[in-house]
Image (cartoon, helix red, strand yellow):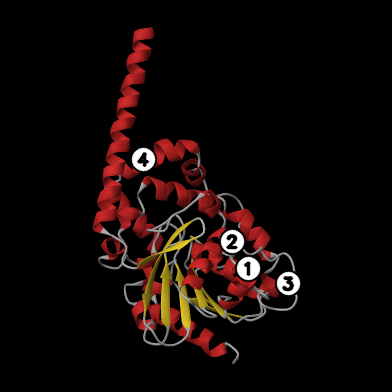
């Protein structure tokens, strides 16, 4: 029996070693095939990958959703907007080429790190656009900088500014308007199913994520993309453009799962402050979005925000910035036109 147990343990250890080596090899290949196309900005606690398009007009920050990276916006939408804005695209902490950290589970912490990067780029009063999970980060950005620079501090429950971001800096990068695209904004009923908690756990980090990184094939990846775009089709070449293998790296899978799995309580706390956000907010949401359903997120949020305009797109799923990019671009331009002078 002892010999059998020893052989079983040795076999398991060898299998795990092979899996981890294969996962690391795939990660290195993904990073070689899809290197950063922008600049790496050193901020307190880590580095942020940023890409800047355009040079004129108002500053526009674009924040991607779960399991993605900044290239999600560069199949045409960002280039279109760069004709009228200085477009700044960020990889969220722990995804793409930005570094993570234990505290980067919270959207408030992510917003703080991105604000620090925005300050390093000398942004001024940007419009902040967020898609899906990025919408939660955009809302956290607006909440954190609400009243920044005023004589009186913001009233609770505004999330506090990161210690590394002085109020004077926060005032310079305070959001002047929000554009929320399929935004995760409200606490939802029920849970997320077993996958996210499992992937966010220690077992997920050390076993499940490396297995997916090592052995996920094209069919599984294409099926995952199809579920995100449904009921519309995935644009041709999207996976290659995004560098989807960057998202299957074990570290990214685990961080993404921790962020998504931990989002609900943060949204519950953030929602208490939405009524105090009086900046212009443009919202675009597909009526067929089953990932972030509009009945749970967009419509209740629109009722809470005093200056929100919601446009629902009939029959559109979770990716309107690809399916109806003209609607998203129009929302950005409407938001810019609603910003008060001075």
Compare residues 23 and 36 and report the one nearer the observer: 36
**Label 1 vs 2, first from the N-terminus:** 2
- Within 10 Å of the Cα at label 4, are there few (<14), some (14-19), or many (20+) other Cα atoms? many
Inter-mark Cα distance, 4 to 1: 35 Å
Tell me if 145 is positioned left or right of 336 in this view. right
**Label 4 vs 1, first from the N-terminus:** 1
Residue depicted at 41% across the width and 87% down the height: 56
Q: Is residue 248 visible?
A: yes
Inter-mark Cα distance, 3 to 4: 45 Å
* Closer to viewer: mark 4 or mark 1: 1
**Residue 274: % across, % down:** 67, 70
**Label 3 vs 4, first from the N-terminus:** 3
Query: Where does label 1 land, which residue?
Result: 144
Query: Where does label 3 land, which residue?
Result: 153
**Residue 241: % across, % down:** 28, 65
Q: Are marks 1 and 2 in contact (CB under 8 Å)?
A: yes
Tell me if 36 is positioned left or right of 294 in this view. left
Query: Where does label 4 land, which residue?
Result: 210
Secondary structure of the residue carrying numbered label 1 = helix
Inter-mark Cα distance, 1 to 3: 11 Å
- Within 10 Å of the Cα at label 2, are there few (<14), some (14-19), or many (20+) other Cα atoms? many
Q: Quadrant of the N terminus?
A: top left
**Residue 159: % across, % down:** 66, 63
Query: Where does label 2 land, which residue?
Result: 108
Secondary structure of the residue carrying numbered label 2 = helix
Q: Are marks 2 and 3 in contact (CB under 8 Å)?
A: no
**Label 4 vs 2, first from the N-terminus:** 2
């Amino acid at each position: 029996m002892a010999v059998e147990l020893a052989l079983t343990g040795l076999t398991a250890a060898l299998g795990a070693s092979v899996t981890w080596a294969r996962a690391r090899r795939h990660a290195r290949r993904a990073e070689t095939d899809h290197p950063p196309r922008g600049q790496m900005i050193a901020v307190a606690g880590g580095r942020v990958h940023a890409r800047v398009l355009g040079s004129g007009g108002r500053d526009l920050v674009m924040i991607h959703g779960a399991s993605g990276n900044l290239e999600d916006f560069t199949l045409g939408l960002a280039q279109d907007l760069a004709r009228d804005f200085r477009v700044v695209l960020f990889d969220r902490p722990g995804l793409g080429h930005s570094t993570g950290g234990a505290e980067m589970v919270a959207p408030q912490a992510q917003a703080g790190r991105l604000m620090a990067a925005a300050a390093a780029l000398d942004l001024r009063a940007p419009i902040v656009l967020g898609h899906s999970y990025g919408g939660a980060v955009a809302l956290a950005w607006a909440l954190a900088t609400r009243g920044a620079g005023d004589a009186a501090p913001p009233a609770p429950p505004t999330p506090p500014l990161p210690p590394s971001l002085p109020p004077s800096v926060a005032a310079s990068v305070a959001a002047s308007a929000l554009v929320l695209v399929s935004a995760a904004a409200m606490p939802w009923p029920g849970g997320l199913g077993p996958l996210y908690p499992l992937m966010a756990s220690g077992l997920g980090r050390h076993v499940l994520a490396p297995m997916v990184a090592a052995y996920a094939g094209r069919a599984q990846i294409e099926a995952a993309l199809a579920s995100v775009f449904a009921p519309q089709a995935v644009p041709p070449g999207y996976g290659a453009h995004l560098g989807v293998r960057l998202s299957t790296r074990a570290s990214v899978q685990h961080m993404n799962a921790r962020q998504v799995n931990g989002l609900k309580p943060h949204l519950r706390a953030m929602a208490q402050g939405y009524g105090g956000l009086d900046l212009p907010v443009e919202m675009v949401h597909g009526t067929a979005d089953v990932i972030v359903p509009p009945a749970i997120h967009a419509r209740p949020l629109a009722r809470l925000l005093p200056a929100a305009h919601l446009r629902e797109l009939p029959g559109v799923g979770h990716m309107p910035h690809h399916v109806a990019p003209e609607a998203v671009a129009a929302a950005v331009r409407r938001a810019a036109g609603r910003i008060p002078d001075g």
